[in-house]
Every structure is written in structure tokens, then in C-alpha cells.
């Protein structure tokens, strides 16, 4: 029992750096660059966020399958473990986050220096995050569904603790901007402190995890070639359905979180007469927004775990999540049509919380489906391809993130989004800003409905049935016992 508790805590603490880094890079970085990085010239902060970041995500996505194959090959030959690559990931993610959010002034003001700087540390972070093989590690540790749920839920809850302080980042910046020279410096220092704490705890947690060697079911001596990955994909119908469905599901959360930062700042905290954002009000509202973004998602994760314990098929849990999210999208669309969000921030926060609760429900079933696809690949091919499967999912996620960033960046360019960063003053056309906010309201509601219904249809086609699932798990367990015995 003590060994199992140690393992759960180890996996949970190990996740802190990755959780914080993903929260910052996937949903906060675009907002930080457009509103707090003072790039001068034609290649402004808005242009960098709109044009360069989507391309960088595509560039990084291209190497994910290769990194997955490298990890699986090293694990197959028993030269390295998945835990080793998680350690490398923690160090690279922590370093690149600190560098990205602490851009020196003499670099940020000159596009010739700022753009290469952003490119290097953006790619370094994504390269490091691709080595974070936590899903592959969980699959190796246990085939028991209830244990896997613990390995998914506990890291999510513990990760929430390191992410929660982000809700106070703008309050810290507002209180210390004069002492620390600017909002940007204050944000960078705040994030650096959080990241160093997360990194220390993550490295300690990694040392607590006792990883078993990946099960090798191949009876003949053979190597692990890159073609084995493609053979695995061909023999793994559940993986195809999971990746396609998850590709659509992921759009919802990323778009909602990115849009909500701009929507709250300019819809509720902008004084049109003065032409500036009221800093104290924005610090207060951003704190509320952070709580609305994280708490319902965390609660949804816990409820999703309860659903998955009762249901043998994790795909049912995914569809419950999708239907709730799509329903809330319809509710938000009706409220937006009747202009209920224009001045009623309480209503907006409440509806957003319910919608994000639906998104949170998908986390546990999605993680279980990913590990189930790893099980299926091992069952059919006899070779561990866990990291390859995780990174193929990551590849699609990065395509999805790139599409969201490009879509969002197009909005900013079309509506002429321009601000004076040092004074938080909007210098574009006020009518264009109002139109942009209206469209943001509609997009926030329509995407969960349209994308959610597409994902629902896909997950209804998930091919692995309970009888085959039971047989697969029993076979894997017997073979593990035989190999370890």
C-alpha cells in the first residue's frame, strides 16, 4: 500500500512542470505577446502572435512522431525508461518557460532580435514537452482501470495547485509594476518563481516513481524499427477513432480560454471614454476568470472519474462530456444573440463555468482511451509503442493548436487589434473593437456546438467492445505475470 501511495504521489508531483508549462503556452502565451511584449515596427506583437506562432506549432508537430519512435526504441532495447525522458522534458520545459516570459527589453523592442528569440524558446519548449511521456509511463505501470484512473486524476488535482496561482498574476503585476519597472517584468518574475517551484517538485516526484520495464510480448528476437510504428497504426482501429475524435474535442477548450482573456479585458474592463483598460478592475476580473477556468474543469475531471469507474467503455464518458458541452454552447449562443453578455459579467462567468465543466468531464475518459489504444497496440504487435501513440496524439493536438492560433490571429488582424502596451491604451478603431468582441461571443458559443457534435458522431464509432476489452486486459496481465515470474 505504501509503495502504491508513493507511486501516486510521484506521478502527481512529476506532472507539475508540464501542467504549468502547458497552461502558459497553450492558452496564455498569445495574450502575453500581443498585450505585454512591446515589439516595434511593422512586425508588431499582434503580427507575431497571428502569423509566427501557428507556423512554429506546425514545425514542432512534424518531429513529434520521430521523438515518439526514439523513446519507444530506447525503451524496447531497455537502454532508457520513459521516466528518463520525463526528466529531460521537465528540465527543458522549465528553462524555456522562464526564458519566454522574461524577454529582455533590448530584445523585445527590436523585431530582428525578438522574433528569433521567440522562435528558439517556443520550439525548445515544444521539443521538451514531446518527451513528457506520462501516458506511456502510466500504461507500463498498470493495466487495472481503477489504478489508471488514480494515476490520471491525482496528477490533475495536484497540477491544479500549481496552476491556481496564475489567477493572481495580474493582481501581482498591478501591485508591483512600478517597483519591477513594468507589467511585463512583474509577470515574468511571478511566472519564474512558480516554475522553479514546480520544477523542483517535479524532479523530486520523478525520483519517487518505480517504473517497470515495458512488456515485450514478441516471442522472437527482433529490433524496433520505425516501420513498426506504421504497422501498429495499421493494426489499431481504436487509435484512429480516438485521435480523430480527440482532434475535434480539443478545439473547444483552447478557443474558449484564449478568447475569454480578450473578451473579459476589453468587454468588462475597458473605459471607452478614456480609451484605456482599468488595471485594478482587470486584475480583479482576471482573478475571477482564472477561478472560472480552472475550478469547473477540475470538478469535471473528478466527476469524469466517477463516470468512468461505473462505465466499462471510456468512450461513453467522452460522449457524455461532449453532449453537455454542446448543450451549453447552445445556451450561450441564445444569450449572445440577445446581447446578454455585453454588460453582465456574472452571467458570462456562470455560463462559461458550466461549459468548461463539460470540457473537464472529457479528461479522464480521454486519458483512459489513450492508454487503451496503447494496450491494443501491444496486444496486436507485441512491441511497446506507447510514446509513439502519445506523440501521434500530440501531433494532432499541435495541428489543432496551430489552427486555433491561426484562426484567432486572423480575427486580431481583420479587426485591426492595436494597443499601446506601456499604457494599456487601445489605439485601433473603437467600432472594430466592438465588432470583434461581438464575434468572439458568437465563436465561443458556436464552436462547442459544431465541433462537439462532429466529435460525438466519431466517438459513437469507437470499435473496441467490452468483451474484446476484457479479453485484451486479461491477456496482457497474464503475459506480464509470466514475464516477471
Image (cartoon, grey):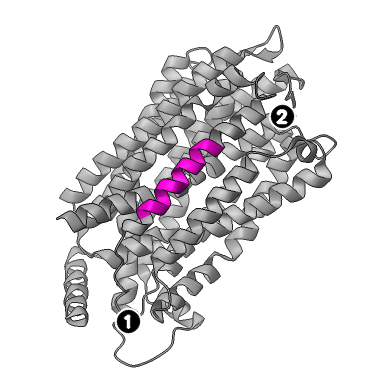
Frontmost residue, 409 versus 432: 409
Q: Is residue 391 left or right of residue 433?
A: left
Q: Is residue 65 left or right of residue 37?
A: left
Q: Main secondary structure of the magenta part?
A: helix
Q: Secondary structure at mark 1?
A: loop
**Which disc number belongs to residue 482?**
none
Q: Which residue is mark 1?
A: 382
Asked if residue 197 lies in the magenta stretch, the reply is yes
The residue most toward the top is 273
Residue 390, horizontal then vertical, whole percent = 43, 63
Frontmost residue, 338 versus 79: 79
Residue 334, horizontal then vertical, whole percent = 44, 23
Frontmost residue, 81 versus 65: 81
Frontmost residue, 434 versus 446: 434
Q: Quadrant of the N terminus?
A: bottom left
Residues in magenta, as a range: 192-205
**Which disc number belongs to residue 415?**
2
Q: Is residue 409 left or right of residue 261?
A: right
User: Is residue 322 visible in this depiction of the protein?
Assistant: no
Q: Residues within 10 Å of mark 1 (few under 14, many from 20)?
A: some
Amino acid at each position: 500500500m505504501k509503495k502504491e501511495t508513493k507511486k501516486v504521489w510521484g506521478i502527481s508531483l512529476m506532472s507539475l512542470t508540464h501542467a504549468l508549462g502547458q497552461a502558459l503556452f497553450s492558452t496564455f502565451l498569445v495574450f502575453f505577446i500581443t498585450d505585454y511584449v512591446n515589439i516595434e515596427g511593422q512586425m508588431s506583437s499582434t503580427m507575431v502572435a497571428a502569423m509566427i506562432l501557428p507556423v512554429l506549432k506546425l514545425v514542432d508537430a512534424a518531429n513529434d512522431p520521430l521523438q515518439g519512435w526514439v523513446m519507444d526504441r530506447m525503451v524496447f532495447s531497455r537502454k532508457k525508461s520513459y521516466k528518463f525522458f520525463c526528466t529531460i522534458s521537465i528540465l527543458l520545459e522549465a528553462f524555456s518557460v522562464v526564458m519566454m516570459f522574461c524577454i529582455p527589453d533590448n530584445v523585445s523592442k527590436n523585431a530582428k532580435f525578438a522574433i528569433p528569440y521567440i522562435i528558439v524558446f517556443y520550439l525548445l519548449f515544444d521539443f521538451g514537452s514531446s518527451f513528457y511521456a506520462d501516458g506511456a509511463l502510466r500504461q507500463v505501470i498498470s493495466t487495472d482501470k481503477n489504478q489508471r484512473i488514480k494515476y490520471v486524476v491525482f496528477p490533475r488535482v495536484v497540477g491544479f495547485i500549481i496552476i491556481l496561482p496564475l489567477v493572481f498574476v495580474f493582481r501581482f503585476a498591478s501591485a508591483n509594476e512600478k517597483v519591477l519597472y513594468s507589467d511585463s517584468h512583474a509577470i515574468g518574475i511571478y511566472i519564474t518563481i512558480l516554475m522553479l517551484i514546480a520544477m523542483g517538485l517535479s524532479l523530486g516526484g520523478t525520483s519517487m516513481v518505480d517504473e517497470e520495464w515495458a512488456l515485450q510480448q514478441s516471442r522472437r528476437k527482433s529490433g524496433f524499427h520505425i516501420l513498426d510504428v506504421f504497422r501498429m497504426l495499421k493494426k489499431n482501429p481504436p487509435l484512429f477513432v480516438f485521435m480523430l475524435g480527440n482532434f475535434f474535442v480539443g478545439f473547444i477548450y483552447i478557443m474558449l480560454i484564449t478568447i475569454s482573456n480578450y473578451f473579459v479585458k476589453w468587454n468588462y474592463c475597458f473605459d471607452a471614454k478614456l480609451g484605456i483598460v482599468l488595471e485594478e478592475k482587470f486584475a480583479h476580473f482576471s482573478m475571477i476568470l482564472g477561478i472560472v477556468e480552472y475550478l469547473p474543469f477540475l470538478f469535471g475531471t473528478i466527476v469524469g472519474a466517477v463516470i468512468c469507474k461505473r462505465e466499462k467503455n471510456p468512450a461513453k464518458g467522452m460522449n457524455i462530456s461532449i453532449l453537455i458541452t454542446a448543450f451549453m454552447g447552445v445556451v450561450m449562443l441564445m444569450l449572445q444573440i440577445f446581447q446578454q453578455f455585453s454588460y453582465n459579467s456574472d452571467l458570462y462567468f456562470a455560463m462559461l463555468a458550466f461549459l468548461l465543466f463539460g470540457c473537464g468531464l472529457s479528461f479522464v475518459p480521454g486519458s483512459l482511451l489513450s492508454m487503451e489504444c496503447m494496450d491494443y497496440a501491444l496486444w496486436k504487435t507485441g512491441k511497446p509503442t506507447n510514446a509513439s501513440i502519445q506523440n501521434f496524439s500530440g501531433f494532432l493536438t499541435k495541428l489543432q493548436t496551430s489552427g486555433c492560433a491561426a484562426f484567432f490571429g486572423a480575427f486580431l488582424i481583420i479587426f485591426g487589434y492595436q494597443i499601446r502596451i506601456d499604457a494599456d491604451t487601445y489605439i485601433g478603431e473603437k467600432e472594430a473593437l466592438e465588432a470583434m468582441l461581438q464575434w468572439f461571443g458568437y465563436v465561443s458559443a458556436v464552436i462547442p456546438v459544431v465541433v462537439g457534435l462532429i466529435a460525438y458522431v466519431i466517438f459513437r464509432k469507437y470499435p473496441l467492445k467490452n468483451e474484446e476489452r476484457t479479453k485484451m486486459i486479461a491477456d496482457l496481465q497474464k503475459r506480464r505475470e509470466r514475464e516477471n515470474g
